[in-house]
Image: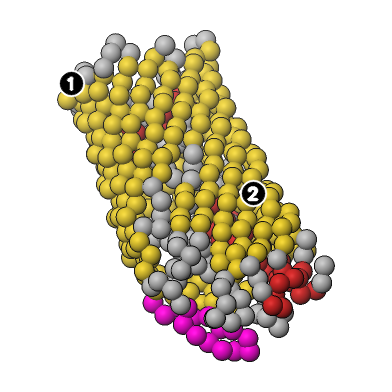
Amino acid sequence: MSSIRTLILSSVALGALASQTHAAGFYLQEQAARGTGRAYSGEVADQGPASLWWNPAAIARSPREVHLGASAIFVDSEVNNSGSTITFPPGVRLPVSGEPFAFNPIQDGVAPNLGVSTPIGDRFAIGLSVAAPYNFTTKYRRQSWARYDALTSGLMTADIQVTGAMKVSDWLDLGLGFDAQYTDAKLQTASPNLSPLLPDGITQLSGNGWNYGWTVGAQAHFDRVTLGASYRSAMDHDVDGRVFVGGLLGPLASGNVDTSGSATFTTPWIATFGARWRVTDKLTLDGQVQRFGWSEFGAIQVTTAGGRQTLAQDYKDTTSGAVGADFAVNDRLTLRAGVQYDPTPTPDGERTARVPDGDRWLYGLGATGRIGERIHLDAALAYIDFAKSDVRHDTVFYAGTPAATLTSLRGSVQGTGYVMSLGLRTEF
């Protein structure tokens, strides 16, 4: 492999994998309809398999129960160009051509969730849960101004958690869970040729892998108050796959290749604290705070045939907070509502178009109806208001070669989201 081909391949693969891991930071909290209805304000202190994602101690006192649910997520978004440029060698700077607006690049999707628990004797319980904590797809048209940052981005994860919990005393429960998480990604980006008159090339990365982590939690039960706390470990990800580069012309043509590639990065730890206060026999108030250790996502180690490189990310730790309430109308119907503030971990000066994220407020409404002796139906709606944020991302294509080309993408993003959640819980 020639030196220019090696440098082109390494540069292109590095850019694609960096964007993919920005996508891995897109955390989905829609793991139970009951939680959606109160804006995820009381899950760490609630009981049953519907709360296993937030606290492995949640099943220590629950009966033998199955929870099955799904959340449909709809996003109405707009990503606009505001002065993006491309600099061709030897320093010719031009505006990025193409459509200046991208409507609804974040695709709608469904996040399923499943949990089951069973007591073992009077003090122990075991459980199994399945969640989809990092799932999303974004798509831009081939002629979009954002094409040098992203065309198609698809990320799917499935987290399988095996849990054991123990009723330590009349008031204290402890839980421990082990997680296996499968990750599958497919990403596509346009790569510029050396003249604005030439069509773009295409870079595509696809990969998958299994990763492992753990979680611990506790609940303290008092007369009218339940306190909950949990910690979910950071998770080291090793993603193996292939890098495809095609459509490069002239002196860049030697960079067209189909080869193996891999990336190593770490997703954040999550610490959750919350409480549920049964004010009256009908009214319960909820509160929850989560601290996300996004600074674990400090760098990406990328390995291709061109060697190994490191890309700094500079994500920041964040804290989300939520409050809510449950109101038991009668023994067959419970209503709930809540509000949550959830800031983005993405740095303002390095936000990409692949996942155009921003700070958000979430407002939830929900209800639970008992439709049988042991069957409960949960339903919820949520509205998400994304703060307007800026896209600002510089990429050097073919870095370290005479063909080095700089794209400076500048834009803005704004949008709203809607969540519809359904869940079914039954004892057996």
Q: How far from the left and from the top, in percent, is residue 373?
A: 29, 11
Residue at x 39%, y 30% (from the top left corner) = 69
Up-down: is 402 above or below 117?
Answer: below
Up-down: is 252 above or below 365?
Answer: below
Up-down: is 149 above or below 122?
Answer: below
- Amino acid type of the residue tagged 2 in the rendering: Gly
**What stretch of residues is rendered in magenta?**
82-96
Query: If the image is split into quadrants, where does the N terminus sit?
Result: bottom right
Residue at x 66%, y 74% (from the top left corner) = 249
Q: Residues within 10 Å of mark 2 (few under 14, many from 20)?
A: many
Q: How far from the left and from the top, in percent, is residue 183?
A: 59, 43
- Amino acid type of the residue tagged 1 in the rendering: Asn
The image quarter containing residue 300 is bottom right
Residue behind mark 2? 207
Q: Is residue 286 visible?
A: no
Residue behind mark 1? 330
